[in-house]
């Protein structure tokens, strides 16, 4: 059975660290924690779980710090988590089964990463990340920010999920600051980092610069298809903020030049038409979203609600605006079957019930 080293980099995580380690400590053979400059009780807490706690000077480079943690691991596989991640109790049996059944020639295990949740705790945003990586020098992190280990060798996918449960506000400017520093130092951003830099600019409402960066990325022959598709969505949102509605729609439709439609993009196109009163076109795109298969293994960002709940709820709105209350109610009930606790579904249900009682 393979052995696993949990490798973490931390800084000022006294609020989260024990929760994270409690969730996984009994499932791994070794814990390695690299601290990049804590001024709180982080190192004290880490020392309760492992003697392998080290200091690493922070140089605005996540890969450098993560590679330091990997270099200190001694087990068969390195597993990374952030301090505000947890492995839920429901995942632990599957985690242990994976250790018992993992083929010996596996180089990398991709696990789900759930990063956003609805009011019932159901994931609404997830994607696959490299989570177990064979402990050898050929597998190392690259990129100062939004770091990654490029997949190679034998890669397997599993449904085990790590959940990102951040509380409180971090440093919202950190990533943008790192990218700005890279550019100031004369470094050329490779396509993947162009995409992430454009996203950071969008989050900081620097829409014109974001459009410039993202359009350059989209025109490049290089870059991952999933990043191209997501870039179309981000770039379209920038155009909307700049009041360029036709450019926004064109960019959303442009996403389909890279691959088959994604439900996330279909929902955005449906929303575009719905907000402009073009109900028939909105219906077409929401129905298209319902018929798009969810392909988690493509590796892109997945919003599961875009494949059922959101288009069903929006089709309810569309048919209600067309005056077809029966069909609207049917779609609302289908949305409720997905999320019976949804406040939007329950509000619509009360609305339709009130119409029947008149």
Image (spheres, rainbow, N blue to C red):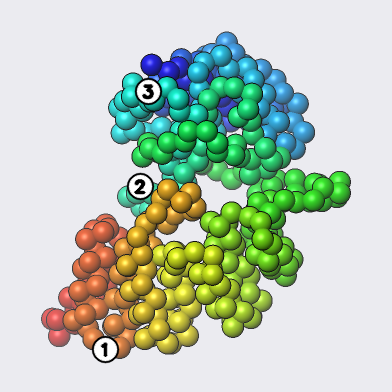
Could you tell me if residue 84 is visible in this image? no
Q: Position of residue 152 (x, y in %)?
A: 55, 36
- Which residue is disc 2 drawn over? 121
Residue 93, image quadrant: top left
Q: Earlier in the sequence, mark 1 or mark 3?
A: 3
Q: Which mark is residue 353?
A: none
Residue at figure coordinates x 33%, y 74% from the top left: 287
| Figure quadrant of the N terminus | top left
Left or right: where 261 falls relative to 144: left
- Which residue is disc 3 drawn over? 99
Q: Which mark is residue 323?
A: 1
The front one of 224 and 184 is: 224
Left or right: where 194 falls relative to 308: right
Residue at figure coordinates x 67%, y 37% from the top left: 142
Residue 236, image quadrant: bottom right
Element under disc 3: helix
Crowding near pointer 2: few (<14 within 10 Å), some, many (20+)?
A: few
- Mark 2 and mark 1: span between their CA atoms? 34 Å
The front one of 45 and 101 is: 101
Number of numbered discs: 3
């Amino acid at each position: 059975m393979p052995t696993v080293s949990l490798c973490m980099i931390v800084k000022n995580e006294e609020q989260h660290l024990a929760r994270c380690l409690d969730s996984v400590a009994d499932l791994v053979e070794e814990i390695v924690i690299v601290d990049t400059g804590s001024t709180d009780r982080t190192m004290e807490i880490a020392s309760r779980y492992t003697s392998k706690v080290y200091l690493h000077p922070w140089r605005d480079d996540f890969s450098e710090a993560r590679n330091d943690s990997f270099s200190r691991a001694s087990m068969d596989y390195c597993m990374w988590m952030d301090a505000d991640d947890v492995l839920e109790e429901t995942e632990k049996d599957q985690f242990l089964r994976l250790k018992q059944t993992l083929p010996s020639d596996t180089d990398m295990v991709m696990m789900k990463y759930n990063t956003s949740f609805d009011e019932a705790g159901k994931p609404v945003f997830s994607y696959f990340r490299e989570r177990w990586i064979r402990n050898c020098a050929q597998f190392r992190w690259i990129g100062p920010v939004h770091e990654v280990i490029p997949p190679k060798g034998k890669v397997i996918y599993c449904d085990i999920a790590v959940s990102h449960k951040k509380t409180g506000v971090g440093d919202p400017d950190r990533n943008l600051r790192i990218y700005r520093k890279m550019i100031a130092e004369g470094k050329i951003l490779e396509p993947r980092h162009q995409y992430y830099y454009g996203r950071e600019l969008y989050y900081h409402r620097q829409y014109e610069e974001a459009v410039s960066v993202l359009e350059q990325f989209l025109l490049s022959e290089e870059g991952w298809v999933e990043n191209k598709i997501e870039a179309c969505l981000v770039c379209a949102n920038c155009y909307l903020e700049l009041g360029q509605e036709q450019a926004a729609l064109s960019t959303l439709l442009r996403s389909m030049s890279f691959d088959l439609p994604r439900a996330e993009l279909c929902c955005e196109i449906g929303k575009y038409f719905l907000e402009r009163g073009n109900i028939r076109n909105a219906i077409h795109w929401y129905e298209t979203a319902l018929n798009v298969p969810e392909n988690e293994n493509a590796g892109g960002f997945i919003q599961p609600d875009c494949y059922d709940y959101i288009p069903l709820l929006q089709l309810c709105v569309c048919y209600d605006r067309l005056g077809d209350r029966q069909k609207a109610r049917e779609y609302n009930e289908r949305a409720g079957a997905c999320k019976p606790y949804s406040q939007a579904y329950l509000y619509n249900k009360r609305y339709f019930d009130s119409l029947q009682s008149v």
